Image (cartoon, rainbow, N blue to C red):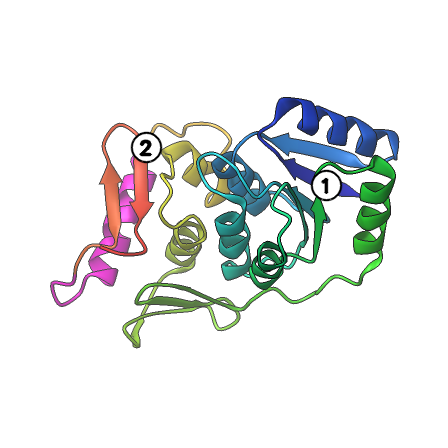
Amino acid sequence: MKILVIEDDTQTRNYVVTGLKEAGHTVDSAKDGCEGLLLAQDSLYDLLIVDRMLPGLDGLSLVKKIRSFGCSVSVLFLTTMCGIDDRVEGLNAGADDYLVKPFAFSELDARVNALLRRPRETVAQNVLQVGELEIDRMKRSVRRNGVLIDLQPTEFRLIEYLVRHADQVVTRTMLLENVWDFHFDPKTNIVETHISRLRSKLNVGDRTDLIQTVRGSGYMLRETI
């Protein structure tokens, strides 16, 4: 099984990763919430093990974002926050289990195995929403404030990728790889051209521009303007 461990404490992260690998799992790791969110969104994992107190993006917010994107991966919180209210808050945010530090690896291993035995949801969330923008993945439709926007297939893939990475800087390379499946630079303005066309369709009626250019970095679709 493939597991992602998101933990900022190096000693704890290495301990968990080593133990899980010895138990036969494929394991990736991240040292902060932002890195963990990117990995969780762009890779297929069977389980996330998440610390609550993470730099960059705290574990609670990370799990809420993952759930809002329609990701049904199992989540285990691993944290020192041991109060009843903390546990309830974590489970309500979308976690499937909650283990308090310090812990015995044998208990962690048992909880991991229990979560991995659960049947996974096979249907991802069909509707993605960021602010006034709504994407229906099954119907391949996009609406802004309820108004249908006619997009070409590539434009749809582009806006879907931006929505899944809302409030994050998306680089030109990321778009080339994930929207066009180019793993090289075609030395054209293909990204810029499609972004321009997409903006013109989203902003009909002098609406506020949802897609912001981050100079020297790429683009960002903002949840709030």
The answer to whether residue 45 of the structure is visible from this angle is no
Task: Give the vertical position of 53 relative to 137 (above or below).
Answer: above
Disc 2 marks a residue whose amino acid type is Thr
Image x and y of residue 24, in percent: 87, 35
Q: Mark 1 points at which residue?
A: 3
Among all residues in the image, which is located at the extreme front?
Answer: 83
Which corner quadrant holds the N terminus? top right
Q: Is the magenta stretch mostly helix, strand or loop?
A: helix
Among all residues in the image, which is located at the extreme bottom?
Answer: 146
Q: Nearer the viewer, residue 99 or 155?
A: 99
Q: Nearer the viewer, residue 134 or 91?
A: 91
Image x and y of residue 108, in percent: 80, 42
Task: Give the vertical position of 23 relative to 81 (above or below).
Answer: above
Provide the residue span drawn in magenta.
189-207
Q: Does the magenta stretch include residue 161?
A: no
Query: Which type of secondary structure does the marked residue at label 2 adopt?
Result: loop
Residue at 73 percent across and 36 percent down: it is 102
Image x and y of residue 65, in percent: 49, 54
Which circle marks residue 37 in the picture? none
